Image (cartoon, rainbow, N blue to C red):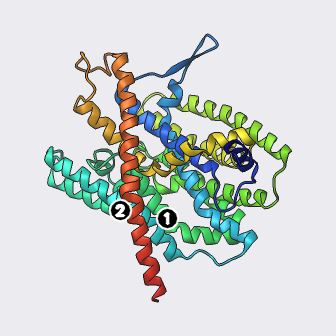
Amino acid sequence: MNPLKRWLSDAKTPPSLKYVDTCDGLRAMAVLLVAWFHIWQQSWLFPGLTLFGREISLDPLVRSGYIWVDMMILISGFCLYLPWARMRYEGGERPSPVDFYVKRLARIHPSYLLTIAVMFAVALATDAYWSREHMLRDVLSHLTYTHMFFYDAYYASNLGGALWTLALEMQLYLLFPLIARAFYKLPATTFAAMVGIALAFRGWVGVHIPDVSLWFNQLPAYLDTFALGMMAAAVHAWIAQRRSNALTRILCSLLCFVIAALFWQVVRRQAGNPGVEAIRLGQMNNRLSMGLLGAALLLCSANAGLILRRLLSNRLTKFLAAVSLQFYIWHQTIAVWILEYRLIPSPFENPNWEGDHAWQVKYTIACFAVSLIVAAVLTYGFEHPVAKRLLKAWNAKRKKG
């Protein structure tokens, strides 16, 4: 079979219950948008494009790029619950909680520790800590995935600004076997409880906490996003085992464009918030909208037609999804280092503030390129081999009883 026929054949194949390939593209999109925001914070390159002679500003998309962390959490809930959703129709044993914890730790913890070690060495070399207490709290809280609970370890950390998301994920992983079991037995009740807790928590924070900086990204504030990902997995399993037809694919494709337009409205609304506190409150207020639209996009893209599915599932998106963990961990720090050490030359002292457009473009491209190279090296040279060895050792130990 020639490549074109194989491509067409693969695109017509109904989505699998074991692996939803369009998640690759959505995960890559979410991570790249978050990265674009962090790089934009250093470059101040205001993006836009010309379409049919009309200037279109993409500033709202970049300015509010941080809200796509919600999509990453949603995809995590979707992928983690998919084996449970599949079990409802295919049978089999429940996933082992111990195996689940080992797999999660094997994939994330070594890379997490490597990041902390490198960042800590740099911090010591540059005398970045203002006190011994700050250093100890920063290191110990990161090692225990609790740095989100301390202001200076969260906002003034020298160990990488992106690691708070991994702390949130680890906290969700700790609870996931219990949540998954409850969701499997009582899906509607568990879903309602998780959404209710998240809405009540965010509502209470918004009314009673003057400064929400340490509250708006805590685990209870994300429970509805995670629950929507799990519910999307359950609905996808129900759809997939019924086999979609041409009408379903056309409808899902059209809905993807509607969802994209609604996402744009959320993005514009969030980008229009004035001031840091309003941005954080807006992020909490828009979280349910992001979750609902993200869940709908997951379902519709997975069951869409040929063109959309191939846009989200191809060699490029699979590569980006594969290196997304390392890219996400390192991109912000790399962007800061490239700026701080003036690796992109400019005649201006502060080229980002003074609007050196040529520098801004070169800097933005360099940040993405270097981050992707570092991510690929760490993914295939460290993350995958170490995880493979750890899981191999675990499986051997388990066989011995």
Furthest residue to the top? 53
Mark 2 falls on what kind of element? helix
Q: At which x and y percent is residue 212? A: 43, 44
| Location of mark 1 (residue) | 173
Q: Position of residue 364 (x, y in %)?
A: 39, 29
Q: Label 2 near label 1: C-beta < 8 Å?
A: no
Quick check: 215 left or right of 257? Answer: left
- Crowdedness of circle 2 by 10 Å Cα count: few (<14), some, many (20+)? some
User: Which residue is most to the bottom?
Assistant: 401
The answer to whether any part of residue 207 appears in the image is no
**Kind of residue sitting beneath label 2:** Pro
Of the residues tagged 1 and 2, which is closer to the observer?
2
Circle 1 residues within 10 Å: few <14, some 14–19, many ≥20: many
In the image, residue 31 lies at what x, y percent? Answer: 49, 43
Marks 1 and 2, how far apart at CA: 16 Å
Residue 298 lies, in percent from the top left, at 66, 48
Q: Can residue 9 be seen in this view?
A: yes
Quickly name the residue at label 2: 110
Residue 186 figure quarter:
bottom right
In the image, residue 93 sits, relative to residue 27, either above or below, namely below
> What's the residue at 25%, 58% (across, down)?
139
Identify the residue at image location x=40%, y=50%.
Answer: 326
Residue type beneath disc 1: Tyr
Residue found 60% across the figure and 50% down from its top: 23
